[in-house]
Image (cartoon, rainbow, N blue to C red):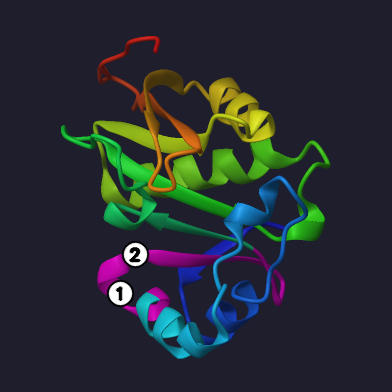
Amino acid sequence: MELVFAPMDREAALDILTWRYPPPYDVYGLDVDPAQREGNVTYMVDPAKRFYAMRRGELVVAFCSFGADAQVPGGEYGGESLDIGLGLRPELTGQGHGHIYVSAVVDFACEAFGPRSLRVTVAENNRRAFRVWRNAGFEPFARFAGPDGKTVYLTMVRAVAGETAHSAVP
């Protein structure tokens, strides 16, 4: 069954906000304060934020966002790259299928937005995510401390076919 992308709707956002990941991936849970749930839903369904639900049949298996929402505070995000955020349903992680979701998101981003290059930011200790994005042609570009001062993030870039992306190994 193929992945279907659709702009985020209320039902999908509410589902995603219940996702919980085991340590050390628990930092990726989106809804830490139930009092903020409605505000988080409103944010995610706002078309300007560019959130998309990824479904297989009726099940939301992942979500993605593009642009400023995919950036981590503390990083430098100049240039023309399109930032990508991706979250996978927790019970689907760690099974070796991340490349399917990354490939689908990259294809969707190129078709929907026509960027010259793509950029993703991953926590340095998330070796699974690093490997998947690296295997998809993304190269490390910068390293920085996140807003908590403890988590180190890597920014990775990839040129779109026929374009050139800047690269530097941190």
Task: Residue at 68%, 48% (x, y): give it.
Answer: 25
Q: SS class of the residue under badge 1?
A: helix
Q: Which residues are magenta?
A: 44-61
Can you say whether 15 is above or below 121 in the image?
below
Quarter holding the C terminus is: top left
Residue 47, numbered label: 1
Q: Is residue 124 left or right of residue 89?
A: left
The residue type indicated by label 2 comes to Arg
Q: Residues within 10 Å of mark 2 (few under 14, many from 20)?
A: some
In the rendering, at what x and y percent does residue 115 appear?
26, 39
Separation (CA) of disc 2 from disc 1 = 5 Å
- The residue at the point 46 percent across, 75 percent down is 8
In the rendered image, which residue does mark 2 sit on? 50
- Could you tell me which residue is drawn at 30 percent across and 74 percent down? 47
* Residue nearest the observer in this picture, 120 or 117: 120
Circles 2, 1 touching at the beta carbon (< 8 Å) = yes
